[in-house]
Every structure is written in structure tokens, then in C-alpha cells.
């Protein structure tokens, strides 16, 4: 149905904006953090493709971009699709981009076939979905859905102290429409799975049932700088050692099996003064917890907090401070939209299976506004993601976007002129 080559060309073209040569993998990766110059350039490219496809483009005060294709009933709430184009620092070409470029490709295809829809169709690009620059993921969609305020989002800073509001202005992406999104009729997001399930089952399409809970916190360990040679062990308040103990503790929580399907990651860790012959005075780390069960997530967070208190008591001069960065509960997707996706896959003769998303997505935020679900496209190499090795085939991407096209047509009501 859609033009597979044109979709692939847009994916590979966009992937060159913010591209870098990854020494570890020898692959071409993408480093396009939200509201960097690379992200701004990618936004300009996507907005141009939207306009070429006849979409009316608007930008809101959060920098979220919406491309609108009118329906025969312009008063009807639109069917929304889309995702994000900001990336992590070691990304591939597909995470988020497939959903945005897939939505634009659907619009191009409808234009070529002269297919009108009763409801408008809109394609969204949400700001800072990854959360890796300003510290809260799904940020743009959370503001659109009203979970977070625009003021809170604009005041968030990156590691250099630059605010998101200032970066929106600097890059020219501070829009002028209200960041709170009027509830769409429905939202469908197409995304690479970023995991091994579809490949393990040999199935091309995933019908996503929901998204697991996410807990992000920053932990700062305060110890005491001391001479590496002269300071006996019993006199040390070693922040680096304490940070290592926290990492091992988290792994023990996961391996204990007593906290459900808990996943724990310390992705950021720095010690100060970060010099060879000084016992670390301070350690800064982030803890990313994931769990499909909110009660188990709460238990794991409580166990971690108790361990920090225990460590404080174990060593004079050692204290901890924590800061909540992000917290989202398990989100179930709409059964009706899931059924529409499954029927669309059947119509294309594509096998599909239902699965929970291990990763967070903008869809989990928009689900607060309207019936929402996602389409997963199979990834290769065990579905690795947040790594330049992230890969899906041109055929799998086209199949997923075909399912997206049929799903959007069913929801928006195809009108044969
Ligand atoms: O963190 C996540 O799950 C997503 O990649 N933002
Ligand atoms: Mn994503
Ligand atoms: Mn991601």
C-alpha cells in the first residue's frame, strides 16, 4: 500500500542528520538530543516533508509539531499518529522516527490514491521523548496531555544549565499554539519494538497492550575527599564505593525475583573530584527502574530507599540525597484500537502477536486523552536499541506502516470520492 522505497529513503535521510561514526560498533549511529542543533535541523527537514505532503503544520509552545490533513468533516476530532525524532546519544535510525515518517508516508499515499477521510488525520512530533537531555522522558507528550505543566517543562535544565525554554527559543522551535492538546478521536503510534519478542516468534507485527511503569531518580552520594595513600580504610567516607554498593544492591533486587519483572539500570555515574589519588567526595548517579506491576515497583523503590539509609548508618560522613526525575505508572492501551490494529494486520495477511512495551512511549501519555494503542515493527539483532546496531528491514518497516495506514483509515473513516 505505502511506498516502501520512499519510506526507507526518508528514514535513511533523516538518520544522516546528527549522524556519527561509532568507534565501538564501526556503525553509523545517530546522536540527536532534543533541541540540539541536530534536532533543530531534523525538525526543519520533517516539517518540510509535512508541507510537501500537503499537511498544515503548527508548532506549540512545547515545540511539539503537528501536521494536519483535513477531513470532509473539519469539526470532527482528528485521528492522531506520530512519535518523536529526538534520539539518545547512541541511537539507530528507527526509534521514534519510524512513527513520524510512517505517518507522513501514509498521508502521501492517501494523497496519491485520492482517498479522503471523514475525520482529519494529524501527524505529531513530540519534544524530548527520550528525556536524556532535560531529565524527564515523554516530556512533550506529557505536557500535551496535561500530566506536566508547560512552566515545569520550560524550566528543566540540561547538564550545562541551559533550560528547555531557552533552547526552544534558541533553535527557533518555540511555537505559538497552546501546548495542551485537544483530545484526538484516537491515537495510533508505530514504533520499532526495541526488544527480541517479535523476532523470537517470527512475527512481523506487534499489537501493543500497554507500557510498563517507569521510575527515574537521581541519587547523590556525599562522602569526604581524602588522600588515596595515607587514609586508612576505616577513616574513609568513600562516595565511589557507596555508589558501587548501590549498583550491586539493585542487581540483587532484580535477581531475587521478589519484585516481579523488575529491571534496574544505572546509566549515569560520575565521581568528584574524579582524580586518581583522591577518595571520591561525591558520586552522582541515576537509577532507572521498570516494572509492569505498580505495587512491585513501589516495593522496589522502598527497598532502595531503605538500603540508602542503611548505608548512611554504616559509615560516618556518608549521606545520600535523592531527586525524583520521572515517574509513570503502568498504562493499559485501548482494547478497541488494539482490535482495529489486529484486523488491519489480518487484512494485510500479516501475522501479529500482542505484547507489553518494555520502553516508554508518547502513546502512554496520549492514552490519557483518547483511545490509544501502538503497532510494533520487528527489530533485528535481538531487537537491540539505543545502540547504532538498531535495525529493522525495509520490508518490516513497510509492513508496519501498511498496518498503520489501514488502521488510520478505519478510525478516520475513508470517504471514497
Ligand atoms: O526510556 C524509554 O523507555 C524511552 O526510550 N524514552
Ligand atoms: Mn522511542
Ligand atoms: Mn528511545
Image (cartoon, grey):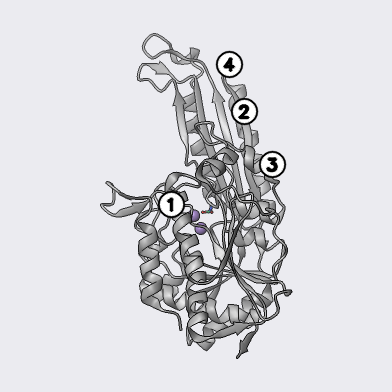
Front-lying residue, 400 or 253 = 400
User: Hey, which quadrant is residue 186 in on the image?
Assistant: bottom right
Foreground label between 4 and 1: 1
Whichever of callouts 4 and 1 sits on the residue coming sooner in the sequence is 1
The x, y position of residue 341, in whole percent, is 58, 78
* Above or below, comparing residue 33 to residue 109 in the picture: above
Foreground label between 1 and 2: 1
407 displayed left or right of 387: right
**Badge 4 density bin: few <14, some 14–19, many ≥20, Cα 10 Å:** some
**Badge 1 density bin: few <14, some 14–19, many ≥20, Cα 10 Å:** some
Q: CA distance from mark 2 to mark 4?
A: 16 Å
**Image point (28%, 54%), residue name:** 27
Q: Which residue is mark 4?
A: 316
Task: Give me the disc on residue 151.
Answer: 3
Foreground label between 3 and 1: 1
User: Hey, which quadrant is residue 294 in on the image?
Assistant: bottom right
Q: Are marks 3 and 4 in contact (CB under 8 Å)?
A: no
**Image point (58%, 79%), residue name:** 407
Q: Secondary structure at mark 3?
A: helix
Q: Which residue is mark 1?
A: 41
Residue 258 appears in view: no
Whichever of callouts 1 and 2 sits on the residue coming sooner in the sequence is 1
Foreground label between 2 and 3: 3
198 displayed left or right of 79: left
Q: CA distance from mark 1 to mark 2?
A: 38 Å
Residue at the extreme top: 230
Foreground label between 2 and 4: 2
Q: Which residue is mark 2?
A: 321
Amino acid at each position: 500500500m505505502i511506498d516502501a522505497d520512499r519510506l526507507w529513503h526518508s528514514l535513511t535521510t533523516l538518520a544522516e542528520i546528527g549522524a556519527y561514526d561509532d568507534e565501538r560498533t564501526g556503525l553509523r549511529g545517530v546522536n540527536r538530543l532534543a533541541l540540539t542543533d541536530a534536532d533543530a535541523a531534523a525538525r526543519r527537514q520533517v516539517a518540510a516533508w509535512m508541507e510537501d505532503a500537503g499537511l498544515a503544520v503548527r508548532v506549540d509552545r512545547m515545540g511539539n509539531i503537528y501536521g494536519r490533513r483535513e477531513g470532509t468533516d473539519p469539526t470532527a476530532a482528528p485521528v492522531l499518529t506520530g512519535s518523536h525524532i529526538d534520539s539518545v546519544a547512541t541511537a539507530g535510525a528507527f526509534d521514534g522516527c519510524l512513527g513520524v515518517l510512517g505517518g507522513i508516508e501514509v498521508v502521501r499515499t492517501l494523497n496519491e490514491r485520492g482517498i479522503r477521510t471523514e475525520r482529519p488525520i494529524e501527524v505529531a512530533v513530540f519534544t524530548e521523548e527520550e528525556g536524556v537531555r532535560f531529565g524527564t522522558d515523554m516530556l512533550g507528550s506529557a505536557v500535551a496531555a496535561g500530566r506536566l505543566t508547560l512552566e515545569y517543562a520550560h524550566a528543566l535544565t540540561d547538564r550545562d544549565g541551559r533550560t528547555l525554554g531557552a533552547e526552544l527559543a534558541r533553535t527557533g522551535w518555540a511555537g505559538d499554539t497552546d501546548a495542551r492538546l485537544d483530545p484526538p478521536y484516537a491515537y495510533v503510534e508505530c514504533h520499532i519494538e526495541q526488544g527480541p519478542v517479535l523476532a523470537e516468534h517470527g512475527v512481523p507485527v506487534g499489537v501493543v497492550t500497554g507500557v510498563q511503569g517507569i521510575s527515574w531518580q537521581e541519587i547523590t552520594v556525599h562522602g569526604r575527599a581524602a588522600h588515596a595513600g595515607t587514609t586508612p580504610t576505616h577513616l574513609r567516607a568513600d562516595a565511589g564505593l557507596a555508589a558501587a554498593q548501590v549498583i550491586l544492591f539493585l542487581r540483587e533486587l532484580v535477581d531475587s525475583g521478589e519484585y516481579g519483572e523488575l529491571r534496574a539500570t544505572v546509566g549515569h555515574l560520575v565521581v568528584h573530584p574524579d582524580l586518581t589519588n583522591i577518595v571520591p567526595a561525591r558520586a552522582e548517579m541515576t537509577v532507572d527502574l521498570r516494572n509492569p506491576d505498580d505495587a512491585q515497583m513501589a516495593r522496589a523503590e522502598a527497598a532502595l530507599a531503605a538500603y540508602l539509609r542503611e548505608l548512611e548508618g554504616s559509615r560516618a560522613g556518608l549521606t545520600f540525597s535523592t531527586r525524583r526525575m520521572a515517574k509513570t505508572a503502568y498504562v493499559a492501551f485501548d482494547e478497541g484500537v488494539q482490535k482495529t490494529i489486529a484486523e488491519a494486520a489480518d487484512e494485510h495477511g500479516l501475522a501479529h502477536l500482542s505484547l507489553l512495551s518494555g520502553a516508554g512511549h508518547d502513546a502512554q501519555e496520549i492514552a490519557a486523552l483518547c483511545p490509544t494503542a501502538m503497532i510494533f515493527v520487528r527489530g533485528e539483532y535481538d531487537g537491540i536499541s539505543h545502540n547504532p546496531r538498531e535495525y529493522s528491514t525495509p520490508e518490516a518497516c513497510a509492513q508496519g506502516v501498511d498496518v498503520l495506514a489501514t488502521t488510520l483509515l478505519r478510525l478516520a473513516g475513508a470517504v471514497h470520492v
